[in-house]
Image: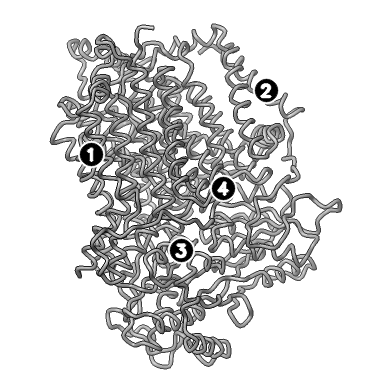
Amino acid sequence: MTLLSVLGVISSAIFSGTSLLYTTLGEVITERSGIVNLGLEGVLLVSASTGFAVTSLTGNPYLGVLAAALAGGLMNMVLGYLVVTRNGNQLASGLALMFFGFGLSALIGKPYVGSRIKGLPRILLPGLSDLPRLYASLFKFDTLIYLAIPTAILLWWLLFRTRWGLGLRAVGESADTAFASGRNPRLIRYQALFVGGLLAGLGAAHLSIAYAMNWTEYMTAGRGFIAVALVIFSKWHPLRAIVGALLFSGAVAFQLLLQSSGVRISPFILDTIPYLLTLLVLIVWGGTRKHAAPASLGRVYHGTE
Amino acid sequence: MNKKQFSLLVAIVVTTAMVLTGCGPAATPTPVPPTATPVPPTATPVPPAATPTPTEPCLIIGALYGGPITDAGYNQAMHESVMAIKQNIACVQIIEAENVPDEAGAKTTMENMIAQGVRMIFATAFNHQNPAYELSQSHPDVIFEHAGGWMMGPNFANFFGEPPDAWYLMGVAAGKMTETNKMGFVAAFPLGWTLTFVNAFELGAQSVNPDVQTIVAFTFAWGDSAKEADATNSLINQGCDVITMHVDSPATVISAAESRGAYSIGFQSLAAQQFAPEYWISGTGYTLGGTLTWLASTVLDGTWEPIFLRCGMAEGCMVMAPFGPTVPQEVQDYVNQVKADLEADKITVFKGPIVDQDGNVQVAEGEVLTDDTMSAVDWFVEGVIGSPK
Amino acid sequence: MSRTAPIHPRFSVFWQRFLNGVILRYTLMVLLVLLLFGAILLISGRNPLQSYKDMLAFTLGSAYGFSEVLVAMTPMLITALAVALPSRLILINVGVEGQLYMGACFATWGALTFRDLPAWCLLPLMALLGMAGGALWAFIPGYLRALGIVNETITTLLLNSVAPKIVSFFIFGFWHSPMDTDKTANFVPAARLPTFFGTRVDLSLVIALVLLALFWWVMRYTRWGLEMRAIGGNPQAARRNGIPVSAYLVVIMCIGGAIAGLAGMAQVSGYYGLLLANFSRGTGYMGFLISWLSFGDPLGILLTSFVVAIIFTGGNLLQLTQGLPFAVINILLAFTLFVVLARPTFLKEKAS
């Protein structure tokens, strides 16, 4: 267990945790407004394939990231239509969106499988230019990684220090009450979904454009559901989501390190720990009755129309 | 339960079906001529067999792949080998299916192919062996060729390249190029053949550099890009400066290595080289076009027999990729010499004595590992770091 | 997360609505879906009419195709049932996916350990093991829900992600040889469910239909069914009337899990003949959707899973005839779901 390998675990956690963090942040916003998005997996896939396709077509990874974010926002708009305008059941609509994402992403991505793209350029953390090549490459991060934590802070500020955030949280606690105090719950939920989708798209973009630099069907491998679990783990708070994302992805990196150190703990058991931890958090701190969850999460808002 | 309501619904469903099929329910499946083949990858010069030729094709061949045919890896190599048949025998027609699921899920695809008139099937994914074998028993008039398996039957056989020699060669190249004496191997599963490849690689490297080590990381999936990126980065973080892999597509591993400034050695398909313009050492790929053409020709002239077909570099079934720009000339010369020696059988990779990680002698002095044992290997040679199970 | 209000109206209301000119709406819905997906096909350069013709000719016009539809339908039927039963108590069992895996896991252990037993001994044993696995996986969320600590939606969702990893752990840790990739060895013939008429339709179809009928009968004609409906309607009142609500919550959740576990056993024993890592790509979630779309009504479940099976089976053919990636058929499925989900008047009922 050398210094290089320990730093390596941290670096790996940051690299693979960034996409998770963005996605989780998006879902925090969405759930704070009262909507559970079980279709995140589909949203991520569509965004990843769109971003990769655009990057491959234009040769510009930034355009790809933009396209991915927009794609995510649009996918969430579909959920919005079903859940907010048509009052559909959130769980079922989310799952339907997931299946939609499976298919649409395959269609979008098919012509680009195996393409080589120029990934997001990586910039060395300032002040570390004297390190040998192997160490230096640990700390060469791309733009999305540098922006991740600032984004989390921005969202925290948005949620807790602005009127928009207040309205959003109000809708999440009780849509009827929010309506009574002059807000438009439907509009706010749409906005939350769009922002959530943008963020999820950024997360997906990081995966396909900056990290794996590849597109294959189903490549997100459950990250959508991991994000939903992470939101609970971080108790719907953007800053705690940073810790959660690092923890979850750190577990993966750590497990790889163990593997090659000859330690024989099954990687699968290690992979389950984040979920079991979340379950524990829920049991100990009570997910339903306590303050944590937005009270109207999952409920359909009928309004007075 | 109201019978009237139920039968009304059934009537609607059946009527709709009948209207759309244009006539009464058919007793036998109506074979529909395929209208398009999947998008051809840019690497192949073969024109797509889009329009069916006015005359009947002399043989309709079906090919299944476990992944996408443009993956710059195993599936692409297999695809190109299959398409070479069409290049060499113009009258055949080829139907392909990508991303065919493992095991029982593949049966539907194969049955559909047979219903379309396919009489020879190439099942290229490892986990297609069972379903292909079962179908060979219920369709005795169709020839099944599986890639990399071991089962045999009256109309079921298998074919593959001979990677271990090629891996030894790659190990030699890697051993010469590494500066940290640590090489990383990203592998999908602890499969007997995978362990054999790793062992061959390490043995080759040890032949030029006795202190070199190979660290193995398993992703437990044939094509999970994110895990492959994780594994590659993790290996590099432990000091490996040469990375290679046994997964379906080398693209992600090589891209990740390239972005970190580590050398890479490719596998599966020569198309992998484009992902590492700078730090590419070399690689090997399957070029089974000639072999598959020969197999198809035996089916055409009725001389096909089930054989356990294996062929290596000497026969052209596996090729070594061109060297990358940073490989010094002396290394290239040395590697070419080893290649010649391997092809002339002057070097036997798995000749005893070979000791494993725990110090046990796995291959005694004077013994040689056979193909059967190679496929069931469950140990790593000394110098490999990782768990073989 | 607050409890969602009842989403399953009474059995008979479904049929009332059905008669009230909804037939026309159904037809329009179907046409809309076909149109939307047809547009997607056109955009990606394929022929919609030919595709639909191929799909229907295969699935309904050929014996082999129809048998494949039945094969695809059966696991979804059983998982839908595993969701429908708890839904009568307003329990949201999204965890069928995980329960499916655990049932498969337990059944595999039986198949690999008791190789020498004859089929009439081994198969029921595997079925029991499968049910035990699923029930165990549903017990934890059920218990936590009965205690009022955590909503079962969240817990089952989390456990869904854990189950496949446990299955992989067993495969790679104990049931694996250097000759296998991500699967176990083939099961002995005694551990395979018998099939019919040379097709792949196996005994699990019969089991599924029996369970379906049993479900209908229990809900309609037994005291348990009555009590369950009471709990579903108004838990407080039910409790005051002496019905042991908490006990029902746990037991019914476990039975739901057991049914899902049985589906898992059927998959490994009937369909695959071995345990493959990550063998289920959303079968459990599909069951959840089917149950939800049919309001947990047995006949509705049967019809819906039949339609979904047609879509998936037809999609397999399109891959060969139109060069369409198999995953794209999910779009047709999703459109069907969207169109149903977006129809408020038909579905609003007593949803909150």
Q: Nearer the viewer, mark 4 or mark 2?
A: 4
- Residue type of the residue flagged with mark 2: Thr
**Whether label 2 touches label 3, CB < 8 Å:** no
Vertical relation: A94 (above or below) B72: above
Label for residue C148? none
Question: Which-is-in-front pick, marks 2 and 3?
Answer: 3
Residue assigned mark 2? B16
Q: Is residue C42 above or below residue A50?
A: above
Q: Amino acid at mark 4?
A: Lys
* Mark before the other along the chain sequence, 2 or 3: 2
Q: Residue C317 falls in which quadrant of the image? A: top right
Q: Chain of mark 1?
A: A
Same chain, marks 1 and 2?
no
Q: Crowdedness of circle 4 by 10 Å Cα count: few (<14), some, many (20+)? A: many
Front tag of 3 and 4: 4
- The three-letter code of the residue at mark 3 reads Val
Q: Distance of mark 1 from mark 4, alpha carbons?
A: 37 Å
Dividing the picture into quadrants, the one containing residue A291 is top left
Numbered label attached to residue A110? 4
Circle 4 SS class: helix
Callout in the foreground (1, 4): 1
- 10 Å crowding of disc 2: few (<14), some (14-19), many (20+): some
